[in-house]
Amino acid sequence: MITDFFRRRLIQPLMDLLRQGLSAEKLALSVSLGFVLGIFPMIGATTILCLVIGALFRVNQLAIQTVNYFLFPVQIAFYIPFFQMGAWLFGYDHFPFTFEEIATMLSRNPWQAIVSLWWANLRAITAWLLTAPLLGGILYLILVPVFKPITARFFPDKA
């Protein structure tokens, strides 16, 4: 009775989640979305973004979240380029990115530093919005042929 309950309420839903979206196209879409959302220039927002977008596109949540988590170092590496691209798009001067300069800004005028960082982050998000569809599309087109033989071998009913 208890094992049947756990199988029905825990094991089976987890297995369904693992099998969800395992066609080559859905898997490529899961990984592409996980990559693009994983480099979103706002620390802490990517998990929720992946959850919401993954549900909307009905992709494999395990795949999208796994890619998202593995991309955290890449997200950090892309942070400054997105900030600089955002500044360039909006015609702003180079924003101070060193820890010392940000610490100086915060010690001199904390409120102005927060406002400056907020607007700089919005410009970085705009830069991400302009690059994400192209990056995601290219990644998807590359990954579909890569995943076709894999899904055909391990999930012949989905190929």
Image (cartoon, rainbow, N blue to C red):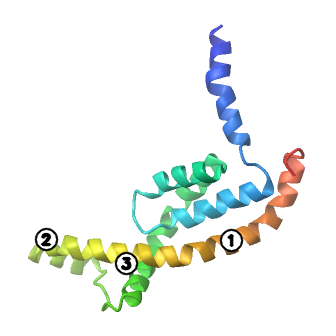
**Label 1: which residue?**
139
Closer to the chain start, of discs 3 and 1, is 3
User: Mark 3 or 1, which is nearer the eye?
Assistant: 3
The type of residue carrying mark 1 is Leu
Left or right of 138, for residue 108: left
Residue 128 position (above or below residue 87): above
Mark-to-mark CA distance, 1 and 2? 40 Å
Amino acid type of disc 2? Pro
Q: Where is residue 45 in the image (x, y as percent from the top left)?
A: 42, 57
- The amino acid type, in three-letter code, at marker 3 is Arg
Q: In this view, does 56 lie above or below 89?
A: above
Q: How crowded is mark 3: few (under 14 residues within 10 Å), some or many (20 or more)?
A: many
| Residue named by callout 2 | 110
Residue tagged 3:
123
| Along the viewing direction, whichever of 127 and 78 lies nearer the viewer | 127
Give the farthest residue toward the left: 108
Instruction: Find the distance from the CA under tag 3 to the CA under tag 1.
Output: 24 Å
Secondary element type, mark 3: helix
State yes or no: discs 1 and 2 in contact (Cβ < 8 Å). Answer: no
The residue located at (50%, 67%) in the rendering is: 39
Q: In which quarter of the image is residue 139?
A: bottom right
Q: Is residue 35 left or right of residue 155?
A: left
- Taking the spot 43% from the left edge, 85% from the top edge, the residue there is 85
